[in-house]
Amino acid sequence: MTEILKVNTCIVGTGAAGYNAACRLKAFGVDDILLISENRVGGTSRNTGSDKQTYYKLSLSGSEPDSIMEMARTLFDGKAVDGDIALCEAALSTRSFMHLVESGLPFPTNRYGEYVGYKTDHDPRSRATSIGPYTSKAMTQALEKECMDLNVPFRDHLQVIRILSDGKRCVGLLCLDNSRTDEIHFVAVEAANVILATGGPAGMYGSSVYPQSQHGSSGLAFEAGVRGRNLTEWQFGLASVKPRWNVSGTYMQVLPRFVSTDSEGKDEKEFLLQYFDAPEEMLSKVFLKGYQWPFDVRKVENGSSIIDILVYMELSEGRRVFLDFTKDPANGAFRFDALDPEAFNYLSRADALLKTPIRRLEKMNQPAIEFYRDKGVDLEKDMLEIALCAQHNNGGLDLDLWWQSNVKGLFVAGEVAGSHGVYRPGGSALNAGQVGSLRAATYIAHRGRDSKSDGKTFGELLDKAVEEMTAIAVEAKDNHSNLEETEKRTTSLMSSFCGPIREEKTVRDFVDQIDGILSGFCRNVKYSDPSELKRVYKLRDNLIAQKCYALSMLDYMAQGGKSRGSALYHDDCGNKPYAFLPETFRYSLDDGSKDGLIQEMSYTEGKCAFTWRPVRPVPDEDDFFENVWREFRKDSNVR
């Protein structure tokens, strides 16, 4: 049975980007819209932290000079970034930020009304701001309320399982109604415009800080003809496993013990000590992890990212790793004044030269303790299990300066959009999601509100999609389900072979395994209960995404790409910065030759093709007021 809905614009996703898109469309007078979600309270915006607690925008306080063009240059300098995208994100950062302020978010101001800021990673100014660990959650809730006040039509429990596209134009969506488990119930949405705001491909990695309620839809987009870009560029960092949360900032700066155990929690040892000549050397690098949280291959040698490597090595040996805040490292056999000056001065100014990490954390950031206590972990007595986890995809789906993909009528906003490059300022993801959804809504309001979908094409694509998705539902049904086993195996392999450490042979072996599953999907993937069908479709989407991402990494290596960002690519002829590291960690740093290039991936009939193109430069136009005003009055700026 297939229920059919018809609207001008369908927005997919109830995170900060999806809600903002709906709000903006309504404000622009586009009423024929529908917001849909697989799980209204799921997703990364509502359920995670790290740079989701930081909002990056133009400086709005103090005497330090800043400008839209300077911020655009900062974003552009992240490498493999299109300049027009960077300029849009800079130009609309203040408008997007103030929309959130007017929606009720209490971003801090001084007594004069200046929105004060602080420096984040890869930030030459003090552009970052925050309202605490739940910034993105508060954004989502405020924008959700605005949508409700605007009476935005909404359907929950609709899981997109096929984007209806002929490869050139998107005409709608096919969804599974997850509220129905007694029978297969499809819901089709015919739409002239679709805004995909489904987040990054969060289900690909086993070691992940993404909430388990977040999945993504990148595989479906690739299948629909949307190009991928910069898919190799991820951020990885240390995060707790239960709950999934980044252990950045003061969690590192208070100098916790790093403890490993066997798989049963026995044979406890403080494993970092064996790799350093003095505990103060080790602790100085641990302290810097707070500032330099993402794994950065440039900081392995003589930097804090060696801590990430050592945790990764310990986990690779089948052990578990924990942070212990209850005791001082090295049994307290270290001197604060022997730490690197940056660490000592910071702790001294914070009045945190105290015994035990928990007392230092209590002094510097009591809410950090309360956060974990609310999640069932008492740092006063419990050790916190951690891993080196996938945290953010800097790459993603293709987009132009209106956040429209190469498939016309299909817009992308939020982390699903590949607007970032190799490096990006911490917190810029939230700004990118707000700007991207605003840009997409603006274009639709000016150029797409009267668009009509091609009913004939929609009908043909829908019939084919229903037939294929029904066949999967029938053929994959079995008395024995292997979904959990298959998910765990493929995501674990993705983390091991396509995570922060990458080697050509193992990545290629991984692709062969994914190909083997996909080529006989209904033979290899089985479910037993109707409620599991949604996981079958998710797994298929995930496998396609894993294949496209892994092949992008192989293409990057084949083109001579070296280690950069959060990825260490093994190189037999490279450098091994520490004698104690295994040969796997021999690498060569990127020489910058690909800084001005973007890798693009196309997926057609199960095969990936790659092209590399120069980035578009930051626009440098003569914006003489009278000329811009004339074009603005003619509504010719939206093109």
Image (cartoon, rainbow, N blue to C red):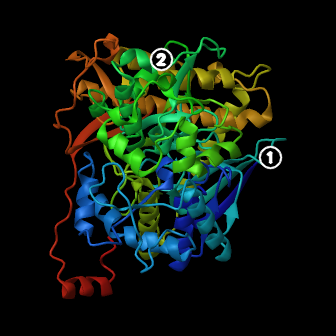
Residue 479 position by quadrant: top right
Q: Secondary structure at mark 1?
A: loop
Q: Nearer the viewer, mark 2 or mark 1?
A: 2
Q: Earlier in the sequence, mark 2 or mark 1?
A: 1
Residue 103 image position (x, y, % from top left): 56, 74
Q: Is residue 130 left or right of residue 463?
A: left
Which one is nearer the viewer's eye here, 247 or 218? 247
Does residue 21 sit above or below 551 in this rendering?
below
Q: Is residue 141 visible?
A: yes
Q: Residue at x 55, y 13 (%)?
A: 318
Q: Residue at x 44, y 41 (%)?
A: 253
Residue 244 position by quadrant: top right
- Amino acid type at mark 2: Phe
Q: Secondary structure at mark 2?
A: helix
Q: Is residue 397 visible?
A: no
Question: Badge 1, how many Cα within 10 Å: few under 14, some, many 20+?
Answer: few
Which one is nearer the viewer's eye here, 55 or 450? 55
Question: Badge 2, how many Cα within 10 Å: few under 14, some, many 20+?
Answer: some
Q: Residue at x 43, y 28 (%)?
A: 499
Residue at the limit of the structure toward the right, as seen here: 182
**Disc 1: which residue:** 180
Does residue 632 sit above or below 83 in this rendering?
below
Which one is nearer the viewer's eye here, 425 or 269? 269
Q: Is residue 388 left or right of residue 64?
A: right
**Disc 2: which residue:** 271
- Amino acid type at mark 1: Arg
Q: Is residue 499 left or right of residue 368?
A: left
**Circles 2 and 1: CB distance less than 8 Å?**
no
Which one is nearer the viewer's eye here, 381 or 444? 381
Picture quarter with the C terminus:
bottom left
